[in-house]
Amino acid sequence: MDFGLSKEQQLLRDSVAKFLASRYDLARSRKAATTGAGWQPDMWRAFADELGILGATLPEDVGGMGGGPVELMVVAEELGRALVIEPYVDTVVLGGGLLGRAGGVRAKPVLEAIAEGNAVTAFAATEPTSGYVLHDVTTTARRDGEEWVLDGAKIVAGSAPLATHLVVTARTEGKRLDTDGISLFLVEFDAANPPDGVEMHSYRTIDDRRAADLEFTGLRLPADSLLGEQGQAWSSISRTVDEAITAVASESVGLMRKVLADTVEYCKQRQQFGQAIGSFQVLQHRMVDMYMELEQSVSAVYLAVLHLDSDDADRARAVSAAKATTSRAARFIGQNAVQLHGGMGMTEELAVGHYFKRLTAIEYEFGSAEQHIARYAELTKAST
């Protein structure tokens, strides 16, 4: 099987890599993450106007380029290599995927705004008692005349403090764990002035991203806030979340490539007992182990990318295999990179410390390795 990129895909990779290498400054992004707004709006605008990546995987009829899973992998990996904090996965992959699949009167204008760099979305799905079981939905939506009324709570809604729109899961019918009866609602949002009926607690995560816990109390929405068919959102959710998991796994590959390269370079320069520590065989073996974990992750991500358009069971199996593999590798490579850098590995001055924090967060984002191993086993059992 040919895993090579086409000329167009290689050009996309080269363009993104060159742009980020010349324009995306790590120190500036860290300052924005820790002391500023949590992101760089001017860089987001450049992603849309100069680079075009915000529309690379969106349909052409909303101003996108119509790219597929491979383009998604290419962009996400390069964003990971540069440790980009802007909400690409939350907006383009999750927001764009949910809006595109569910549809609705208000979906297309928001998709067009995403491609233009004028919209940021956040997916409010996890709840205080659900863990990472996205069909465990207790937030409710009921019809009241020409409006919908939402009540419930969501936690760890990534990028909500930056968002112009929320995409919220709510149960319109059925029992708590049913996949049937879950609906999606689009909420116009301003974190500085949340709409009546929304209480938000925002915070910075361990990897310097922004997230929020949300409480909906009698939030009134117009009838056209419903995305797609009432109670039929699960198919759109499950497929879109698998795409987001694949994007995050691709991001982790970019992160790990950078961390490994920096570690090898450091070990060539760092002197101990009159020679470079990279000449010590035990450390060479450690770096080879890191390289092997990285290559296994690359192969697992390729498998997931090639199965994103497969049937539900095959897609979910490949995605969970990639998530479990990259989560394990993220821990191993991140921890060993810090160890090989010594105490400097955890300082703010070195990039490896910031990359380590992101790798640590990715290990649990969209479910832990153990959860995905369990999902893989359950899907494999069901198919036999």
Image: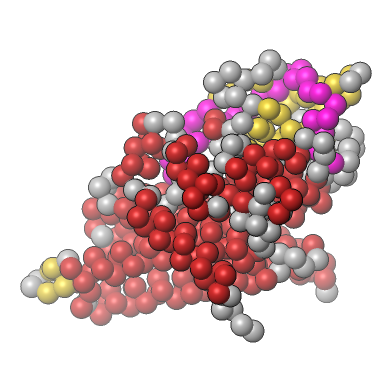
Furthest residue toward bottom: 1
- Up-down relation of residue 122 to residue 332 (above or below): above
Q: How far across and how far down the image is residue 316, in percent? A: 72, 62
Indicate yes or no whether the magenta region holds residue 216. Answer: yes
Q: How is the image coloured?
A: secondary structure
Q: Looking at this view, is 21 or 122 the one in front? A: 21
Furthest residue toward top: 196
Q: How far across and how far down the image is residue 132, in percent? A: 66, 46
For image coordinates 64% across by 84% down, the residue present is 1
Furthest residue toward left: 274
Q: In the displayed structure, does residue 235 sit left or right of residue 195?
A: right
For image coordinates 46% across by 66% down, the residue present is 14
- Up-down relation of residue 167 to residue 282 (above or below): above
Q: Which residues are magenta?
A: 202-228
Dominant secondary structure (helix, strand or loop) of the stretch shown in magenta: strand
The quadrant holding residue 143 is top right
Q: In the displayed structure, does residue 324 sit left or right of residue 265?
A: right
Q: In the rendered image, is residue 205 in sight? A: no
> Which quadrant does the C terminus fall into?
bottom right
The quadrant holding residue 112 is top right
Q: Looking at this view, is 316 or 382 the one in front? A: 316
For image coordinates 29% across by 77% down, the residue present is 284
Q: In the rendered image, is residue 109 in sight? A: yes
Q: In the displayed structure, does residue 249 sit left or right of residue 235?
A: left
Q: In the displayed structure, does residue 187 sit left or right of residue 119?
A: right
Count of picture labels = 0
Q: How far across and how far down the image is residue 241, in percent? A: 69, 51
Q: How far across and how far down the image is residue 11, in percent? A: 51, 68
Q: Looking at this view, is 319 or 244 the one in front? A: 244
Indicate yes or no whether the magenta region holds residue 350. Answer: no
For image coordinates 27% across by 52% down, the residue present is 350
Q: Looking at this view, is 110 or 126 the one in front? A: 110
